[in-house]
Image (tube, coloured by chain):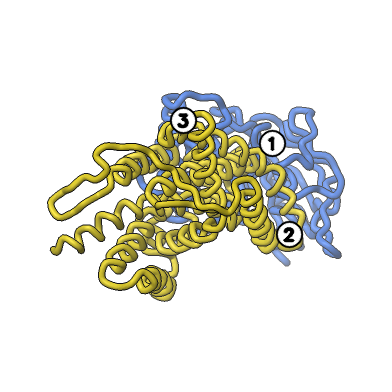
């Protein structure tokens, strides 16, 4: 295997875990609430800005800012849920209304970030020595490896929460059968708020990771992350948080390897061709119904 | 225990329930029979909060529960199964029962103990780590019964528990249902087209016809009532 190809695969795996977290957050919200969160990418960018603010104003390093970011985003969106989502049930078509609502939230958040932080691109620069680590022919920025490690810890915590805790099991049960959850005495509205908080809390934390592995961020790139989130959940299976991880790996490795051999536009096309092919060949996602487990 | 008075429910121009009354004493089984469309499932849906009754009263231990949300009715002690079982297909059997105990303040070991007890009771314990979707339809009905019983309900509403169940599993279901009032202090509303099972299990039977109470009494009374014979058997 050539060094370049190996470099592409390693980059793809690192990006894949981060893309997977974007998809997982989007998937939890969709799976539990049946709401397509068009504003997910904006929440990702808002997470990056929040860490940037903590670094500039309080000197808190981005990796250390993650727990606080998650807590703030979780708490705020838990409350936001009750303002935004329950009124949708009174609409004639709640699903279409939710699409329009979240699209509106997306535009509003983008405009708000533009107002507060201006249009200039920002970056989360942290000093780490050595800047690069070399493994044979593969060179990896140290910060990317750290981001990968943190992302894997988050994935492990998320999996533990969803598969080992009572609340996590109940969230998965809602994805499977919302009515049956009510029958066993669970207040679905409260759990839905937890899912909304969890999804957006994940978006905030993932925003910090993306700001660390990409050179810069601005109020205009939220939609790109939302699009990536949609791609990975289509690949992994809609509504299945962990299935998104596999989809993200495949998408990111395809994109990164293609970018080595072709120009970046073609690399992006390769990623999306993969998504379109999956929709035609395996509409339930790569894992199909297995991903629900 | 459970007292229903003047229960009415209308869907547009169709009157599904025309003022149903019944009383379910503690530790008893009430059989509900009637032809398709007679209002049996609608009545259960009103009791457990899926439908909002148009009028009438539903009291559990003297407390009005009519019109309360489904999860609140469940927490008050009303369990429910469905004609088509609504299990959590991609959770293990143990997790299906674990989720149902979340509101009870039990520790993880207490939840496991209770789940194990009921899985043994319905003879599914050896499959406890399997996913619910791997069970047959009859086994899923047993799992659904175990899932409501693990929460120690006061009253359970069983909607066609024997439909589509093989004779062996049906006998097991009958045996379990029969002992619920005595051993678990649980009253049962049993809706079924299986008259033999209804007559065998029920302390009291009501017959619904076009949303109204046609007849009630013990099994013999209902079995020999001319109106029931005419309406239900068409002879």
Give the SS element for disc 3.
loop
What separation in Å lies between label 3 and label 2 (alpha carbons)?
81 Å
Reading the image, the residue beneath label 1 is B72
Give the SS element for disc 2.
helix
Front label number (1 vs 3) = 3
Reading the image, the residue beneath label 3 is A60
Q: Residues within 10 Å of mark 2 (few under 14, many from 20)?
A: few
Marks 3 & 2 on one chain: no
- Figure quadrant of residue B185: top right
* Residue located 72% across and 36% down the image: B24
Chain whose colour in the figure is blue? B
The answer to whether any part of residue B132 appears in the image is no
Disc with the residue nearer the chain's start (1 vs 2):
1
* Residue located 29% across and 55% down the image: A11
Are dots 3 and 2 in contact, CB under 8 Å? no
Are dots 1 and 3 in contact, CB under 8 Å? no
Q: Is residue B222 above or below residue A269?
A: above
């Amino acid at each position: 295997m050539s060094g370049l190809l190996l470099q592409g695969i390693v980059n793809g795996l690192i990006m894949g875990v981060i893309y997977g977290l974007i998809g997982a957050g989007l998937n939890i919200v969709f799976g539990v609430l049946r709401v397509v969160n068009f504003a997910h990418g904006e929440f990702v960018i808002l997470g990056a800005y929040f860490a940037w603010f903590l670094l500039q104003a309080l000197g808190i390093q981005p990796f250390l800012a993650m727990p606080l970011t998650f807590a703030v985003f979780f708490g705020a969106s838990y409350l936001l849920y009750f303002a935004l989502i329950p009124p949708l049930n009174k609409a004639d078509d709640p699903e279409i209304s939710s699409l329009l609502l979240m699209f509106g939230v997306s535009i509003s958040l983008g405009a708000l970030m533009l107002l507060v932080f201006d249009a200039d691109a920002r970056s989360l620069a942290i000093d780490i020595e050595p800047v690069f680590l070399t493994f044979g022919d593969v060179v990896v920025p140290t910060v990317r490896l750290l981001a990968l490690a943190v992302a894997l810890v988050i994935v492990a915590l998320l999996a533990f929460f969803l598969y080992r805790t009572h609340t996590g099991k109940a969230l998965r049960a809602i994805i499977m059968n919302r009515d049956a959850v009510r029958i066993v005495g669970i207040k679905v509205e409260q759990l839905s708020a937890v899912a909304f908080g969890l999804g957006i809390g994940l978006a905030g934390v993932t925003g910090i990771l993306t700001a660390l592995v990409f050179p810069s961020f601005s109020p205009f790139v939220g939609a790109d992350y939302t699009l990536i989130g949609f791609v990975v959940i289509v690949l992994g299976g809609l509504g299945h948080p962990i299935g998104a991880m596999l989809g993200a790996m495949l998408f990111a490795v395809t994109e990164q390897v293609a970018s080595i051999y072709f120009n970046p536009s073609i690399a992006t096309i390769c990623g999306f061709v993969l998504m379109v092919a999956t929709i035609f060949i395996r509409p339930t996602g790569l894992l199909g119904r297995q991903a629900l487990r | 225990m459970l007292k229903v008075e003047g229960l009415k429910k209308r869907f547009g121009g169709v009157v599904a329930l025309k003022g149903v009354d019944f009383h379910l004493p503690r530790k008893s089984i009430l059989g509900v029979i009637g032809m398709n469309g007679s209002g049996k499932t609608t009545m259960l849906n009103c009791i457990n909060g899926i439908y909002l009754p148009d009028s009438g009263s539903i009291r559990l231990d003297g407390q009005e529960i009519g019109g309360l949300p489904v999860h609140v009715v469940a927490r008050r002690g009303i369990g429910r199964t469905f004609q088509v079982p609504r299990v959590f297909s991609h959770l293990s059997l143990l997790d299906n029962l674990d989720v149902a105990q979340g509101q009870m303040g039990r520790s993880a070991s207490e939840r496991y103990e209770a789940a194990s007890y009921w899985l043994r009771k319905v003879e599914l314990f050896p499959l406890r780590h399997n996913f619910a979707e791997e069970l047959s339809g009859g086994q899923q009905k047993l799992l659904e019964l175990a899932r409501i019983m693990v929460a120690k309900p006061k009253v359970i509403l069983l909607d066609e528990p024997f439909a589509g169940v093989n004779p062996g599993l049906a006998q097991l279901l009958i045996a379990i249902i029969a002992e619920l009032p005595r051993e678990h202090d649980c009253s049962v509303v049993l809706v079924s087209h299986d008259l033999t099972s209804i007559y065998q299990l029920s302390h009291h039977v009501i017959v619904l016809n076009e949303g109204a109470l046609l007849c009630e009494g013990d099994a013999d009374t209902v079995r020999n009532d001319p109106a029931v014979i005419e309406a239900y058997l068409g002879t």
